[in-house]
Image (spheres, rainbow, N blue to C red):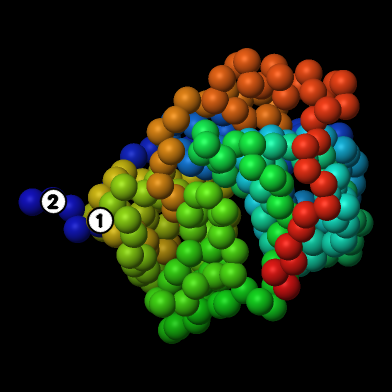
Amino acid sequence: MANKYKTVRNIISAKSALEGAGVRINRVFGYFEKEMTDPFLMMDYFNSDNPYDYNKGFPWHPHRGIETITYMISGEIEHSDSLGNSGLIKSGDVQWMTAGSGIIHQEMPQKSSTKFQGFQIWLNLPKVNKMVDPVYRGIKSDTIPVVTDENATVKVISGTYKDISGPAKGLFVQADLMDIQLMPESELIIRSNPSDTILAFVFEGSGYFDSEHIELISENQLAILNNGNDFYCKSGKSGLRMIFLAGLPLNETIAWRGPIVMNTSEETQIAFFEYSNGTFIKQKNKSQNLS
């Protein structure tokens, strides 16, 4: 008899690393997991109340071929880019940026008395859309719906939960992104496309992601789910908070070098050559504020 819900394919523990000019992050998944996490390329989790872990920030750097999603839970990041956008990504806000043919930006965390906590996620672009015009979209916290019931609180950034849709979305790949909190020993079910990649990263508490309760997923661990049926979760004794991601795999070749993700090594070489000779930027002055 087929399992009624998705089962766990793999479990990955986040690893501490330095990125940017020396920002302490937890790499949840990245280059080595890309076949299992397609269309998502990378997720970094930053979580510190020590400014020395993050105040050097992410100075000017390029992107091409992807969308970057920054979700701030606590603290602020100042953003500037080659489209002419600038401003603060504040607590609860989301920045969804389509790098497309090329964008250069910087993200500089601001010193704060509160914890600096949040995520950056890279979403791949299909081959036919790699060189689209870049677009910057800012989504303010007060425009993001929160669905609350007796045992769960679901912040719907992108996708749909209980007929409530989030304000953000991938321009070329539909990707669901939700911040989910569960009370202790509570269950949650999300309807899902059987072919979607489903990823669940626990950053507070623990939980099970299979209806048989075979293996407890602990804090700072990612569950990669098998295809088929709906998503099931039951929180542990201390409750659970997680980031939920869902998206249809692209199943395309990936040539990945630093902040550039294309389909062939020749395309990545061209990108870095253009960056070095000043021809990287193809489009300027295009933004969309979804606040």
- The local secondary structure at tag 2 comes to loop
Is residue 28 at all visible to an observer of this figure?
no
> Please, which residue is most extreme toward the bottom here?
150
Cα–Cα gap, marks 2 and 1: 9 Å
The x and y percentages for residue 32 are 52, 26
Check the image and report above or below for 99 versus 47.
Answer: above
The x and y percentages for residue 149 are 45, 83
- Left or right: residue 235 versus residue 202 is left
Disc number at residue 2?
2
* Residue at image coords 74%, 66%: 289
Q: In the depicted view, which residue is nearer to us: 196 or 186?
A: 196
Q: In the depicted view, which residue is nearer to us: 75 or 53?
A: 75
Mark 1 — residue?
A: 229
* Residue at image coords 85%, 62%: 88
The x and y percentages for residue 246 are 44, 53
Tell me which amino acid carries mark 1: Asn
* Residue at image coords 41%, 41%: 249
The x and y percentages for residue 31 are 56, 28
Quadrant in which the C terminus appears: bottom right
Indicate which disc, 2 or 1, sits on the residue closer to the N terminus: 2
Q: Are marks 2 and 1 in contact (CB under 8 Å)?
A: yes
- The local secondary structure at tag 1 comes to loop
Q: In the depicted view, which residue is nearer to us: 69 or 65?
A: 65
Locate residue 185: give its quadrant.
bottom left
The crowd level at tag 2 (other Cα within 10 Å; few <14, some 14-19, many 20+) is few
> Please, which residue is most extreme toward the left here?
1
Q: In the depicted view, which residue is nearer to us: 193 or 276?
A: 276
* Residue at image coords 79%, 23%: 274
